[in-house]
Amino acid sequence: MIFRPACLFSLFAACNAFPAYLRSESPLSAQDNGDANVDGLKRIPDAAHPFQPPGPTDQRGPCPGLNTLANHGYLPRSGIVTQADVIAATAEGFNMGPDLAELLWIISVAYDGDLITGKLSIGGPDPRTAALGSLEPLLGYEGGLDYHSTGPEGDTTATRQDQYFNESRALDPNLYIQMQSIAAKYGGQYTIDAMKDVQKARYDHSLAHNPIFYFLPVEALVMMGAKAFVPAFLSNGTFGAGGIANEASIAAIFGARKLPDGRYENVPERFPRNWFRRGTPFSLVDTLAAILDFYTSRDIPFGANAGRVDAFVPLDIGAITDVNGLACVLKQALQANVPSSIAQPGRDLEAVVSFIVDRIDPLFQDFGCPSYNATQREVYSAASQWNQYGPPASADQRPKYGQTSS
């Protein structure tokens, strides 16, 4: 990873390659939630979306939610997706608000996908996303969501190691156990406060052990939002209205399977049995409010380690006291933090900037943020203050299932 001191985001055969418990509805692979708060709620998955483990060419990556949707066919099982795919699948599977889904899509495809085809790999680099196919590197690098140090992917994820320690994008069973132990302090529930503690624990570990740790907009905001998504989206029912985010509701979606000896193994992600999605959409405003709560209630300042663990460089962006202020910080970071393609020869900078600006402005028009009217030179200068870029992800970073905890 490069640090810039001045800058602080064959199907049958495939199925039979997995143990029988992954091809069946065994209780070992999908925990039973028992009674759920189901009044008016939709049960997921439905009969049209059975679980199927990924095949050898299917892309899976760092997001357990997207992996789950692909393993059930709400998203294309190939893991190669479009904007329409993502917005429809996240709404159907998790009741994600369309404004939030659109923002996450914009971040993902602009940083890690193909602006010409509008396609994105939810895992590693894949010629199926690119206009030129296998000749894609001529126009720059499309790393997929595995591409580290870009908007959708960064350090301090709940159950994946920082890339400095492990390039695999699979769940680390030991980190899952850490998250589980924190939830135990909250009665075994993965509440907002429990997930704040998970964020703090992951932040402190990265700060103390990762010499190239970074925690910067946009990536840091996405990391906090992802932890808020655990109670918001993975609860059985609507969190705060009787829905519970506990071991039964989250383990299968995270791809964590408990072994008879008490250890955990990472397996392909899936929906659990008797699971009902939240009753109301979780919107962009809801997400910003949750991120603000995370940031202001735990000591997790923005910044980066300058090549060693005792050289943290803070990024001072002033006080953030309300959702509108946070929204404008995110908007500024998104529009100034030009995608990783800016550092790659052959990518059309003007097209990338235009893509970001034209699509971000309407999403933030109700927050009172100023419009962004920077020249290419100004955009590049701004980007150097907000982000650092990691090396391209390699094709072998797809999750390797079967890893067990110690």
Image (cartoon, rainbow, N blue to C red):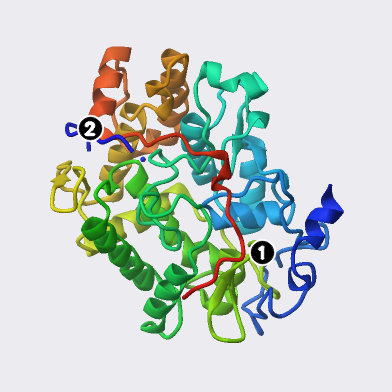
Tell me the amino acid under the disc marked 2.
Arg
Image quarter of the N terminus: top left
Residue 347, position as x, y percentages in the image: 47, 17
Q: Are marks 2 and 1 in contact (CB under 8 Å)?
A: no
Residue 252, position as x, y percentages in the image: 62, 69
Q: Nearer the viewer, residue 368 or 326?
A: 326
Q: Residue at x 44, y 77 (%)?
A: 180
Residue 199 in the figure: left or right of residue 265: left
Image point (59%, 21%), residue name = 136
Helix or strand or loop: what does disc 2 sit on? loop
SS class, disc 1: loop
Q: Could you give the CA–CA distance between mark 2 and mark 1, rounded to whole angstroms? A: 39 Å
Q: Is residue 37 above or below residue 201?
A: below
Q: Which mark is residue 4?
A: 2
Q: Nearer the viewer, mark 2 or mark 1?
A: 2
Image vertical order of residue 211 relative to residue 298, above or below: above
Label 2 environment density (alpha carbons within 10 Å; few <14, some 14–19, many ≥20): some
- State left or right for residue 397 relative to residue 12: left
- Indicate which disc residue 270 carries: 1
Q: Residue at x 17, y 31 (%)?
A: 6
The one nearer the camera, 398 or 97, is 398
- Residue 29: % across, % down: 69, 74
